[in-house]
Image (tube, rainbow, N blue to C red):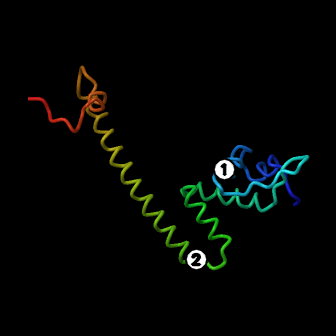
Amino acid sequence: MNHLTIGHAAKLSGVGVETIRFYERQKLIEQPPKPISGFRRYPPETVRKVRFIRRAKEIGFSLREIRELLGFYFDTQISCEEVQRRAKVKIADMDNRIAALEKMKMALQGLVDECGNRDGDCPILESLAENPEQESEP
């Protein structure tokens, strides 16, 4: 595979051209120099990196974390154990976010259930309008 235009690199990577430009601005991939006349040409490695980024995003890594993982991928000194440790930290973070989402879901479900048992004002809207820092009125 020879050097590619941004459009061809994007197509092979399964992303849009703007995604590649975004990754360049985020310093996840390098922007090749632009020749005096013509288009930038991307090395085949760009496709591999963009696919790597896409897959890492799909399993929940942030762009900051992906930048680190890319560095690890190209650093032969990094151990698999270090990458595994970071993945376990990410899993713990996901578990915490799932627990927080479950708590929010239960709170909202409680308000929805209360709606069915009440006429008049909407408990959901009333709850959203409350100021939790303000003491209840006498």
Q: Residues within 10 Å of mark 1 (few under 14, many from 20)?
A: few
Secondary structure of the residue carrying tag 1 is helix
Number of numbered labels in the structure image: 2
Where is mark 2, residue-wise?
Answer: 80
Vertical placement of 47 versus 127: above or below? below
Q: Residue at x 46, y 63 (%)?
A: 91
Q: Residue at x 29, y 35 (%)?
A: 111
Q: Residue at x 67, y 52 (%)?
A: 23
Viewer-closest of 12 and 3: 3
Q: Quadrant of residue 104?
A: top left
| Most distant residue in the left direction | 138
Q: Label 2 amino acid?
A: Cys
The percent coordinates of residue 123 (x first, y second) are 26, 29
Vertical placement of 44 versus 14: above or below? below
Secondary structure of the residue carrying tag 2 is helix
Quadrant where the image shows the N terminus: bottom right
Quadrant where the image shows the C terminus: top left
Where is mark 1, residue-wise?
Answer: 25
Please tell me which of labels 1 and 2 falls first in the chain.
1
The percent coordinates of residue 63 (x first, y second) are 58, 55
Vertical placement of 19 versus 89: above or below? above
Disc 1 and disc 2 in contact, CB within 8 angstroms: no
Q: Nearer the viewer, mark 1 or mark 2?
A: 1
The percent coordinates of residue 10 (x first, y second) are 76, 49
Q: Is residue 45 left or right of residue 85?
A: right
Gap between marks 1 and 2 measured at Cα: 29 Å
The percent coordinates of residue 39 (x first, y second) are 86, 47
Q: Is residue 69 left or right of residue 132?
A: right
Q: Is residue 120 left or right of residue 34?
A: left
Q: Is residue 66 left or right of residue 127?
A: right
